[in-house]
Image (cartoon, rainbow, N blue to C red):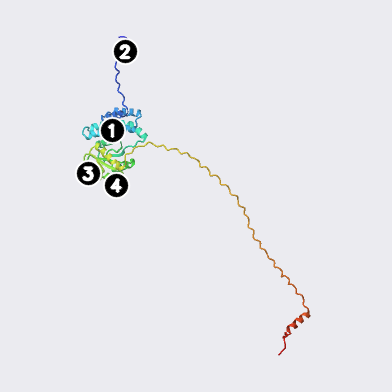
């Protein structure tokens, strides 16, 4: 067969189908499926691929990890999954979460809630406690695992330090379940009981015992514990959603103009008031009286004599 014939046959041949890389919602659905099936390597690779495409970390967490673990919890409650399947799925979820954690911390994405969890003092069993912690993480909680044989004071310290919404306690033995009541008593003594909701669980625990010691919630299994925690959470505060930081507009500092100087008023000349000059009235010399002409001695004598002489009567005396 000539070279040209081979080239023509190759051109006519149907091209091999190449598996397309999932994009967008399809990629996140594939991530959820990988977690449900417990495929750790696939979950990690799909998470890295979603980040490389620019998918938001919060969306990967919600539509990939939390959605997948939600299905696992439903199957566990329906007895379709058992403890081994639950552990395998949680391992796949943790592999994907390890990729997301640095991005979540960098962007400041807040968890749905915070939970402090541990096995009470004197009890060394941790299988049930670990399952609940995994399921809570898969639901978007930040979990502070204190381990086993935890003293009441340690529960209180961790709750205060991490501002926990929920304090979750586990016990497998009837002899150690009394320690749950001690933790609630210490919470009341520290006057922080109203700030933290208390959840309990374990093989010997019942709803009746939870009511008796004053616990806020009880769950018979890990999947139910997640549902109960979410129910209790709004009573503490609403789920926190991180908001992108808002850049405040930079205000231009405008220097205030100095006020124009006021025109100076002409200075008033101080005119001293002149003291009123008192006019001194000079006493006028009395005007000289007009001198009467001097009467002669003869006239004076005649006038006196006339005055003394009686007047003559007219007619004859009868």
- Observer-side mark, 1 or 4, equals 1
Q: CA distance from mark 3 to mark 4?
A: 18 Å
Q: Position of residue 290 (x, y in %)?
A: 74, 72
Disc sitting over residue 209 in the figure: 3
Q: Is residue 33 left or right of residue 277?
A: left
- Image marks 3 and 4: residues in contact by CB distance under 8 Å: no
Which residue is painted at 30% across and 15% down in the image? Answer: 12
Q: Which mark is residue 188?
A: 4
**Residue named by callout 1:** 67
Height in image: 35 above or below 315? above
Residue at mark 2 to residue at mark 3: CA–CA distance: 81 Å
Task: Examine the rendered structure and indicate whether residue 299 appears above or below residue 146.
Answer: below
Q: Which residue is mark 2?
A: 8
Circle 4 residues within 10 Å: few <14, some 14–19, many ≥20: few
Task: Kindly tell me whether residue 118 is visible in this rendering.
Answer: no
Residue 277 horizontal side relative to residue 296, left or right: left
In the drawing, does residue 286 fall left or right of residue 204?
A: right
Q: Secondary structure at mark 2?
A: helix
Outermost residue on the bottom side: it is 318
Pick the residue in front: 260 or 49.
260
Q: Secondary structure at mark 4?
A: helix
Front residue of 153/193: it is 193
> Dot 2: few (<14), some (14–19), or many (≥20) neighbours within 10 Å?
few
Of label 2 and label 4, which has the lower sequence position?
Answer: 2
Foreground mark, 1 or 3, reads 1
Taking 26 as reference, is 313 left or right? Answer: right
């Amino acid at each position: 067969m000539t070279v040209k014939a081979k080239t023509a046959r190759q051109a006519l041949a149907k091209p091999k189908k190449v598996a397309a890389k999932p994009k967008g919602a399809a990629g996140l659905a594939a991530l959820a499926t990988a977690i449900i099936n417990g495929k750790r390597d696939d979950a990690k690779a799909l998470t890295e691929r979603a980040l490389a495409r620019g998918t938001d970390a919060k969306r990967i967490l919600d539509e990939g990890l939390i959605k997948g673990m939600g299905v696992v919890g439903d199957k566990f409650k329906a007895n379709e999954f058992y403890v081994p399947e639950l552990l395998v799925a949680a391992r796949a979820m943790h592999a994907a979460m390890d990729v997301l954690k640095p991005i979540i911390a960098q962007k400041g994405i807040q968890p749905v809630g915070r939970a402090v969890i541990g096995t009470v003092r004197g009890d060394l069993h941790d299988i049930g406690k670990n399952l609940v912690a995994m399921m809570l993480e898969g639901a978007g909680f930040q979990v502070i695992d204190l381990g086993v044989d935890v003293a009441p004071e340690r529960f209180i310290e961790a709750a205060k330090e991490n501002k926990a919404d929920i304090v979750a306690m586990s016990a497998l033995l009837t002899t150690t379940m009394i320690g749950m009541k001690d933790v609630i008593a210490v919470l009341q003594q520290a006057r922080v009981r109203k700030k933290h909701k208390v959840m309990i669980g374990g093989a010997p625990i019942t709803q009746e015992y939870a009511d008796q010691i004053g616990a806020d919630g009880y769950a018979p299994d890990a999947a139910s514990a997640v549902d109960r925690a979410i129910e209790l959470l709004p009573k503490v505060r609403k789920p926190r959603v991180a908001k992108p930081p808002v850049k405040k507009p930079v205000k231009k500092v405008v220097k205030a103009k100095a006020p124009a100087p006021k025109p100076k008023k002409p200075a008033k000349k101080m005119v001293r008031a002149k003291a009123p000059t008192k006019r001194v009235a000079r006493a006028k010399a009395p005007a000289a009286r007009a001198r009467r002409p001097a009467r002669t001695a003869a006239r004076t004598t005649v006038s006196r004599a006339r005055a003394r002489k009686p007047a003559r009567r007219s007619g004859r005396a009868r």
